[in-house]
Image (cartoon, rainbow, N blue to C red):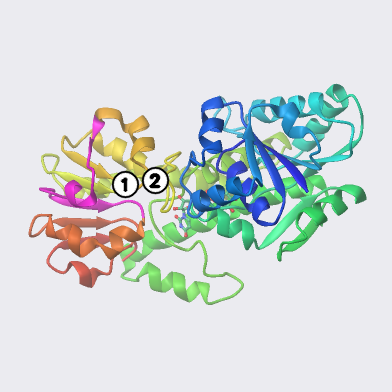
């Protein structure tokens, strides 16, 4: 089946590559000509495990193409996927729908008169697909289309695996014809297809992300209590997770949630609730506590390390296995620390370029983790990269004989660092 994807970001690109793996022919459209040129040469514009390899393979097989020409990309497409950004608006809460509205208008204006299903993969507030439908009614010369909500549940750093082994594929539409078309799109996929109304599908996405954000906030609250009462948060989390009603995922205590999704989507959900004259106090508390966690963790560092001492920060991305530093709690911590500490050296395996955009010259950038820790009085681990864990012995060879190690993602086994003062979360 020919598929056209609008947007080549963290959602559009892995989805495009994933659909090629299912046997479809995909054309991805983006306005950024330089990005499109890079992608046509197989140069992935973002880091995602397995993405580069699959991209090269599908380019070679001519299964995937990249273009700035939307008209050409829409020719013969049976499914169009809108995967553009919906960032937080200037009001700091609601979702900015400018890009999705623009993309919908351009698709509507250029859509050939063959039945096409338009799927919204961008995360959009309840009712947005009705708005997209209105745009199509206004700008499309025909009515040979259906608008479907097809929320995505890919995690960055795991997107290809999540695409191929999704827990569920939620398809929001009342149209029988659209259901059939999307069933065919996923016929090579083993995951359960769950059909709902369009509004329910839109809300499933926000409700899921906010629920996971609340779960993270909850385990961080438990970690705070563990630190006071002598319990160990990893043992508590494991014990909770053995109850299948609770589940063992998203119970890793740490620096709080970041990235381009949870912070934005929790705020947008709370905003939607207000629009509908209700409220979501649980979500609001998770947003607030997550914000306050940065200051709390910085204060703890300040209580352990003098302002004249040297800091090495390991990890800047919002989580491991990505280069993404958007809304990264690690970057926020680094930024706050830079106001007090003169000597901060940072290192991240993939996120240095993105972190530099925010931190600029407030910190020093190391080329290797071993360089970052040279001469440092305190090593602070902020992202759970496996390479830090497996190489920590080597990393420590370059550090002072005895230094302070603050492990804010509970990455290390305390036995690995017995000669040092070791602090972690929730223990
Ligand atoms: C999240 C959702 O998990 C995906 O299902 C969804 O598709 C995506 O948002 C989206 O809306 O596009 P993502 O933001 O890529 O995915 O990353 P997560 O793995 O969910 O992590 C989010 C944040 O929570 C990270 O900062 C991570 O470090 C933190 N986290 C996660 C914890 O602090 N503890 C945990 O146990 C799990």
Give the residues in magenta. 362-383
Left or right of 129, for residue 98: left
On screen, residue 48 versus residue 386, left or right, reads right
Along the polypeptide, which appears first: circle 1 or circle 2?
A: 2
Q: Is residue 344 above or below residue 388?
A: above
Circle 1 residues within 10 Å: few <14, some 14–19, many ≥20: many
Q: How many marks?
A: 2
x then y, percent, for residue 55: 55, 48
Q: Can you tell which quarter of the image residue 224 is in?
A: bottom left
Residue drawn at point x = 75 percent, y = 49 percent: 201
Q: Quadrant of the C terminus?
A: bottom left
Quick check: 163 above or below 366?
below
Report the side of 11 relative to 141 (left or right). left
Residue 249 location in percent, x, y?
A: 52, 65
Real-space Cα separation, disc 1 to disc 2, in angstroms: 7 Å
Which one is in front, 353 or 55? 55
The residue where tag 1 is placed is: 348
The verdict on label 2 being within 8 Å of ligand 1 is: no
- Circle 2: element type: loop
Residue 100, image x and y in percent? 68, 31
Q: Residue at x 61, y 26 (%)?
A: 31
Say whether marks 1 and 2 touch (CB < 8 Å): yes
Mark 2 sits on what residue? 317
Tell whether position 371 is magenta: yes
Task: Give whichever of 404, 184 is nearer the camera.
Answer: 184
Q: Nearer the viewer, residue 68 or 13?
A: 68
Q: Residue at x 34, y 63 (%)?
A: 426
Q: Is residue 12 above or below residue 163?
A: above
Helix, strand or loop for disc 1: loop
């Amino acid at each position: 089946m020919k598929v056209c994807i609008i947007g080549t970001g963290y959602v559009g690109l892995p989805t495009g590559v994933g659909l090629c793996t299912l046997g479809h022919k995909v054309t991805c459209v983006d306005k950024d000509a330089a990005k499109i040129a890079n992608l046509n040469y197989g140069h992935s514009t973002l880091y995602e495990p397995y993405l580069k390899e699959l991209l090269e393979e599908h380019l070679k097989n001519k299964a995937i193409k990249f273009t700035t020409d939307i008209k050409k990309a829409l020719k013969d497409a049976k499914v169009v996927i809108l995967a553009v950004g919906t960032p937080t608006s200037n009001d700091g809460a609601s979702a900015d729908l400018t890009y999705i509205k623009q993309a919908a208008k351009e698709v509507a204006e250029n859509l050939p008169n063959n039945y096409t299903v338009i799927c919204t993969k961008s995360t959009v507030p309840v009712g947005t697909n009705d708005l997209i439908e209105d745009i199509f009614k206004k700008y499309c010369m025909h009515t040979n289309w259906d608008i479907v909500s097809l929320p995505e549940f890919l995690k960055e750093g795991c997107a290809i695996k999540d695409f191929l082994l999704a827990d569920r594929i939620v398809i929001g539409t009342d149209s029988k014809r659209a259901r059939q078309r999307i069933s065919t799109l996923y016929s090579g996929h083993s995951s359960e297809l769950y059909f709902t109304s369009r509004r329910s599908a839109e809300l499933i996405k926000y409700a899921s992300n906010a629920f996971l954000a609340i779960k993270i906030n909850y385990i961080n609250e438990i970690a705070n209590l563990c630190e006071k009462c002598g319990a160990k948060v990893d043992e508590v989390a494991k014990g909770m997770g053995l109850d299948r009603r609770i589940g063992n995922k998203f119970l890793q205590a740490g620096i709080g949630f970041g990235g381009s999704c949870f912070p934005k989507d929790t705020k947008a959900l709370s905003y939607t609730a207000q629009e509908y004259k209700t409220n979501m106090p649980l979500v609001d508390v998770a947003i607030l506590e997550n914000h306050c966690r940065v200051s709390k963790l910085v204060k703890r560092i300040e209580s352990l390390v003098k302002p004249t001492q040297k800091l090495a920060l390991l990890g800047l991305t919002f989580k491991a296995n990505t280069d993404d530093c958007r809304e990264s709690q690690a970057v926020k911590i680094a930024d706050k620390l830079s106001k007090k500490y003169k000597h901060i050296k940072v290192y991240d395996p993939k996120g240095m370029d993105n972190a530099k955009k925010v931190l600029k010259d407030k910190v020093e950038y190391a080329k290797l983790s071993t360089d970052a820790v040279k001469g440092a009085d305190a090593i602070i681990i902020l992202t759970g990269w496996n390479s830090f864990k497996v190489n920590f012995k080597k990393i420590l060879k370059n550090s002072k004989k005895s230094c302070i190690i603050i492990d804010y993602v509970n990455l290390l086994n305390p036995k690995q660092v017995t000669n040092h003062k070791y602090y972690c979360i929730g223990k």
